[in-house]
Image (cartoon, grey):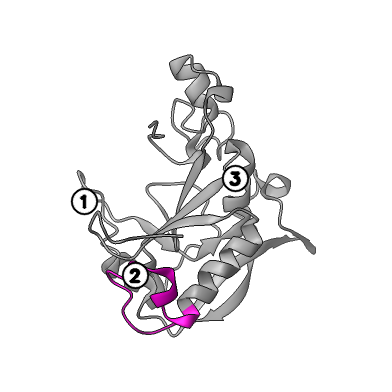
Amino acid sequence: LIEGAQGTLLDIDHGTYPFVTSSNPSSGGITTGLGLPLNKIDRLIGIFKAYITRVGNGPFPTELFDLDGEKLQNIGKEFGATTGRPRRCGWFDTPLANYSIMINGFNEITITKLDILDGFEEIKVCTEYELNGIRTKNLSTFINQLDDVTPIYTTVPGWNCSTVGISSFDELPKEAKDYICYLEKILSVPIRHISTGPKRNDIIVR
């Protein structure tokens, strides 16, 4: 089991330079860092939160500066484990996720912290960016202009009830299942695992 230390958008070669780290936390780092060829690996799992966060500076198209952002931060306990520094929070960003899938070659996805969205009447998903009259789902088009893009959202209904500890996909509220299926459709990669709480066994395996 090999775990990347940081997110793909912090990759020194493929991230949002200059707001990057000093290494390759993408799947390519397995080969460069460990000397292990990727043809020896048959599962590449992308880990995405049900929303999105970022620590420190850097572009963040879907960042929320309203009560929804504060709610995600507080319920999700989005504060650095060591420093206590608050994480910036926003809605799920499909162009970012699809870029990560492309760079890493993910063949399955895990969605974490679904339960943090339990109290929302509506949930938004960024499906495209717009800049100067141009709309695109392709992050690469605007990767150096992310501070200037306008996110285009699709709004889906929330489920407004607790999913904490649910261990079967069929037992999730309909709207929660619909949200997962919607993400799966727009990402074109199967979502195999979903976490519904902070405990190790609060995980749905599909």
State how far apart marks 3 and 2 are (Cα): 23 Å
Magenta span main SS:
loop
State how far apart marks 2 and 1 are (Cα): 22 Å
What amino acid is labelled 3 in the image?
Answer: Ile
The answer to whether any part of residue 150 appears in the image is no
Please tell me which residue lies in front, 154 or 110.
110
Q: Quadrant of residue 161?
A: bottom left
Q: Which residue is mark 1?
A: 84
Quadrant where the N terminus is found in the figure = top left
Q: Is residue 101 left or right of residue 175?
A: right
Q: Which residue is mark 2?
A: 115
Question: Residue 10 at x, y = what percent?
Answer: 48, 38
Crowd tier of the residue under label 2, counting other residues whose Cα lies within 10 Å: few below 14, some 14–19, many 20 or above: many
Q: Which residue is mark 3?
A: 101
Question: Residue 147 at x, y = what percent?
Answer: 58, 53
Question: Residue 148 at x, y = what percent?
Answer: 63, 56
State whether residue 198 is above or below residue 81.
Answer: below
Crowd tier of the residue under label 1, counting other residues whose Cα lies within 10 Å: few below 14, some 14–19, many 20 or above: few
User: Which segment did they paint magenta?
Assistant: 159-175
Residue drawn at point x = 33 percent, y = 73 percent? 71
- Cβ–Cβ below 8 Å for labels 3 and 2? no
* Magenta stretch encompasses residue 165: yes
Residue drawn at point x = 57 percent, y = 64 percent? 183
Please tell me which residue lies in front, 104 or 125.
104
Between discs 2 and 1, the one toward the N terminus: 1
